[in-house]
Amino acid sequence: MVNFKEDRRFRQCTKEMWVTVLFFIFNLLVTGGISLWIGYNKPVSEVKIVMGFPDWFFYGGIVGWFLLIIGAYFMVKLFFRDMSLEAGEGGENK
């Protein structure tokens, strides 16, 4: 029988994976939700143009993405850690 010792980095990687998956789902909900809320079933005559784009695309696709890019920056700063990928080190880089 092999004596298995779990690497300490595994727990951090699992946390980072779940944070990323939740951020991706949030991203889809924000982008799709804003776009659908503003533009779904809207007659063409009521669609406003903002900087050359339909309003639903501008707010959901452009403004929403800029806000989510800022959110991704803070997600990485708060939840992610810099770790060595070398076998046997198992520690964090400081």
Image (tube, rainbow, N blue to C red):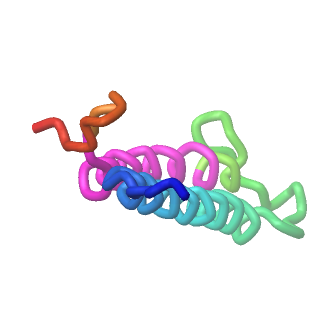
- Image x and y of residue 48, in percent: 70, 53
- Image x and y of residue 60, in percent: 62, 54
Q: Nearer the viewer, residue 13 or 43?
A: 13
Residue 71 in sight here: no
Q: Nearer the viewer, residue 47 or 79?
A: 79
User: Which segment is the magenta one?
Assistant: 59-82
Q: Residue at x 79, y 61 (%)?
A: 46
Quadrant in which the N terminus appears: bottom right
Q: Residue at x 76, y 66 (%)?
A: 36
Q: Nearer the viewer, residue 58 or 48?
A: 58
- Image x and y of residue 6, in percent: 40, 57
Quadrant in which the C terminus appears: top left
Q: Residue at x 16, y 36 (%)?
A: 93
SS majority, magenta: helix
Q: Is residue 1 left or right of residue 94?
A: right
Residue 10 in sight here: yes
In magenta segment, residue 32: no
Q: Residue at x 59, y 56 (%)?
A: 24
In magenta segment, residue 65: yes
Query: Can you name the residue that lies furthest to the front here?
Result: 1
